[in-house]
Image: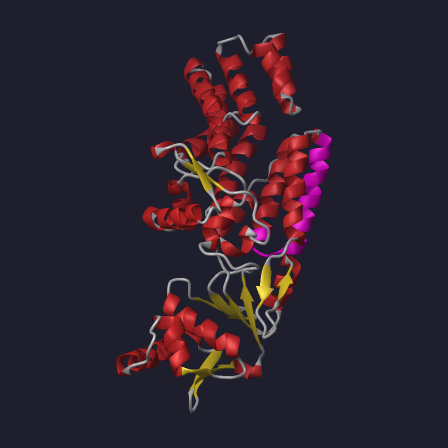
Amino acid sequence: MDSLITAAALALAHGDPLGALKRVALRDDAPALALRGIAMAQLGDFPRARTLLQRARRAFGPREVTARARCTVAEAEIALVSRDLTWPIKPLDDARVTLTARGDHANAALARILTARRMILTGRLRDAAALLDGGATTAALPPAAEAAEALARAGLAIRRIDTAGARDALSAAGAAARRAGIPALMAEIAAAAAVLDAPAARVVEADGGRLLSLAEVEAVLASQALVVDACRHAVRSGANHVRLDSRPVLFSLLVSLAKAWPGDVARAALIRDAFRGREADESHRARLRVEIGRLRDALAPLADITATATGYRLLPAEDRPVVMLAPPFEAPHAAVLALLSDGEAWSSTSLSIALGSSTRTVQRALDALARSGTIQSVGRGPARRWMAPPVPGFPTSLLLPGPTPGH
């Protein structure tokens, strides 16, 4: 490896893409193409970066397996940062195996971290935790890789509503980033730390409620109260929980009952809220009885639903209080908006993969948000991407898919 290549690689390792380009911008050999691609990625030109890395991977000979694997890892990182979740994961897994076998532990660790970050983004929290916990190696990682791994652990802890674990991981990430001396990495860690202090949810009360930080949400979820979580469409009490995200009618009935607790809700009001019926006829009342029975079965043994003279009342087990959690600010299509609020450009296909919804459902949500001026798009056809400015009060830890906090 010649001196210019070495100098350019050192510049990239210290977060200086312009310094790297000064040395290799006019070269078209495989190592230079790879370094130019990484430099363009650090400058934010992801399409150009991906093209350069693909050229570099093809330019490396068949015997240069390690170099080709490193190019694959760099491409995977660009795909993740540009929110291209359609990029296949198998090449990254193969590259990780190759790099581990050839002793390149730093890049193998990066491949493992990228896979874990993608899992976190798509709500596969258990798989991500297993991958991060199973990555111990006897070789010391560079400070930048240490910071990236700690940042991934912090993101996992935030999604699990584990504020103590998130703070510990962010502290470790900050220390590693300072050793690495990369300003962009330190800024990313600072942005992640700000999520812990931002409003994460709202307690719905008779006076309108109050905003809660992530730590306060964690305390509510750990209490013995019956928590109706409108962020994740679930209900829990202590270690027991029931998810109702696939049963919207039942959850709508539960929300109406929780808001009125300890009082009851009239049958006509329940029909209006759950079925959108303006007038309660006999068919609506019959359907209400059926759905209340289904909700009663779903909530057992957390709570019961009793009939009153005018309607129904929620009756938590062991006389526990009822706490209603809602997103901090009311907004339609909150889950889509929560993903877009990271400031990155998303395709509708990647959004549907991250949310586990159909592309058509996501597209309808995007069209509605665009009409309201909340988001904007760039490009056309398959190249169309959607963006939104960071939205206060929309933490992805509560609004995005994944296991109920603590599970």
Please, is residue 129 above or below residue 24 in the view?
A: below
Q: Is residue 167 magenta?
A: yes
Quadrant where the N terminus sits is: top right
Q: Is residue 80 visible?
A: yes
Q: Tell me the residue at 50%/75% (across/down).
A: 258
Q: 250 or 267, which lies in front?
A: 267
From the top left corner, tell me how far across and down residue 391 is, in percent: 56, 48
From the top left corner, tell me how far across and down residue 140 is, in percent: 66, 32
Q: Is residue 240 visible?
A: no
Q: 171 or 400, which lies in front?
A: 400
Q: Which residues are magenta?
A: 158-179
Q: 124 or 257, which lies in front?
A: 257
The residue sitting at the left extreme is 283
Please, is residue 33 above or below residue 323 in the view?
A: above
The part of the image, by quadrant, that contains residue 220 is: bottom right
Name the magenta segment's main secondary structure: helix
Q: 330 or 251, which lies in front?
A: 330
From the top left corner, tell me how far across and down residue 378 is, in percent: 43, 34
The part of the image, by quadrant, that contains residue 92 is: top left
